[in-house]
Amino acid sequence: MKPQTVKKLLKLNYDLYESQALDWDKTRSAIWEKPILDFIDKIKPKSSILDLGCGNGRLCDCIAKHGLSTRFNSGSKQIKQLKIKYVGIDISKKFIELNKKKYPISHSESFDCHSEHSEESQDRLREESRDPSTSLKMTAEFKVGDSLTVNFKNRFDYIISIAVLHHIPSKELQLKFLRNIYQALKPKGKILISVWNRWQPRYKKYFIPANPKHEIPAPKQARYGANRNPKLRKYPRQSASLSALISDLEKCDTIVPWKQSGKFRFIHCFTAEELKKLAKQTGFKDIKTFYADKTGESDKENGLNIYLIGEKNG
C-alpha cells in the first residue's frame, strides 16, 4: 500500500468520527460485550487502565458501574477501596470534549462510584451488614492523542482498546499500534483488544471481488465503483477519490459508508488467526483470540467481534 493511501485512509476515518461524534454517542451508550465485562471483573485494586481509542468514554462508565457491582456480588470482604486510575485517549477532539462534559470525574478528579453509580450495591451492602464506606475510588483523565504516536513506558496495568485496530491500514502500522501498547504496559500487564468480525454473511457484500487479493467473492451488484455500487452513487463527488483508494487496498481491506452521512470508513477484516500472529510478533505471551457474540464465544460466521487477550512479559 502506498504511503499516500495510508495517510488518506487514516484521514478518512478521522473525518468520519470527528463529524459524527454526537450521533455516534447516541447509539453507543453502554458496554454490552461479555468478554469485556469478564475482563473488567478481573481488574485488581489500585490498577491503572488505558482506554486506547476511548470514543465516547463508555468503557470508563462501565468500569465505574460494572466493576463496583461485580465486586460486591462476589462476596469479597477484603476490598475497601479499589482506587482505579483511568486514562482515556482518542484522536477525536470532539469525543474528548464530549467526555469531559459527560463525566464529572474528568481532569483527574476523584469520585465515589458507590454513592453516585450503584444504588443497588448500596442496598445489598446494607442487607448484608457490611461496611457502607466500601467503594470504588476512581480518577479519570481524557486526552486527545493518536494511538500510533502515544509514547508511554511501563505505565499501565491494563490496556483496553475497543474497535480501533481494524481502522488502521497496513500491517506495518498495525504492528506499530500493538508495539505502542506493549511499551505502555507494565511488566505482566494485560491487554484486551477487540475488532469487528466482518466475516459474518451479512458483511460479505462489502468485499471487493474485482481485486484478486481479496478472498471472498461478492455479488456483482455489491462491487465498489461509482457505476456499480448504489451506495457510492449517492455520493458522486467522493466516488472518484474512493475508487483511487480502493485500487490500492490490501487483502481483506474494505471501505464502507456510514449510514446516510456521505462519510466512509476504512476497515481491515481481521481473522482471529491473523490477530494472534500479530500479537506474537509484538512479543505478547499467554495469547488468546476468539470470536464472540452477545452471550460469549462463538464461531467465525456468527461472532460479532474478535477478541485478543494477552500479557506482557515480566
Image (tube, rainbow, N blue to C red):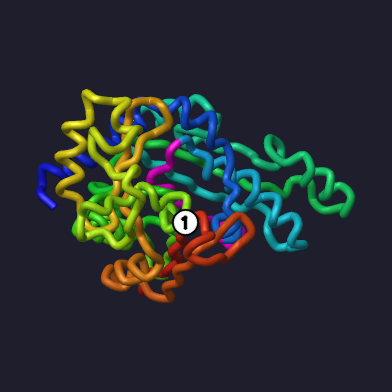
Q: Amino acid at mark 1?
A: Gln
From the image, tell me which residue sits under label 1: 200
Q: Which region of the structure is painted magenta? A: 39-55
43 over 168 or under it: above or below: below
Q: Is residue 102 above or below residue 288?
A: above
The stretch drawn in magenta includes residue 273: no
Figure check: 137 above or below 93 = below
Can residue 18 be seen by looking at this rendering?
yes
- Point out the image quarter for the C terminus: bottom left
The residue closer to the viewer here, 278 or 305, is: 305
> For numbered disc 1, what is the local secondary structure?
loop
Instruction: Please indicate whether residue 237 sits to the left or right of residue 265 in the image.
Output: left
Q: Residue at x 21, y 36 (%)?
A: 242
Residue 195 shows up from this direction? no
Task: Please give the name of the residue rendered at 42% of the width and 58% of the height, measured from the top-left corner.
Answer: 199
Residue 42 in magenta stretch: yes
Q: Is residue 292 left or right of residue 227?
A: right
Q: Residue 156, image x and y in percent? A: 41, 56
**Which quadrant would residue 226 be assigned to in this image?**
top left
Dividing the picture into quarters, in which one does residue 45 lie? bottom right
Residue 102 x %, y %: 53, 28
Q: Position of residue 293 (x, y in %)?
A: 57, 57
Residue at 58% x, 41% y is: 30
Q: Residues within 10 Å of mark 1 (few under 14, many from 20)?
A: some
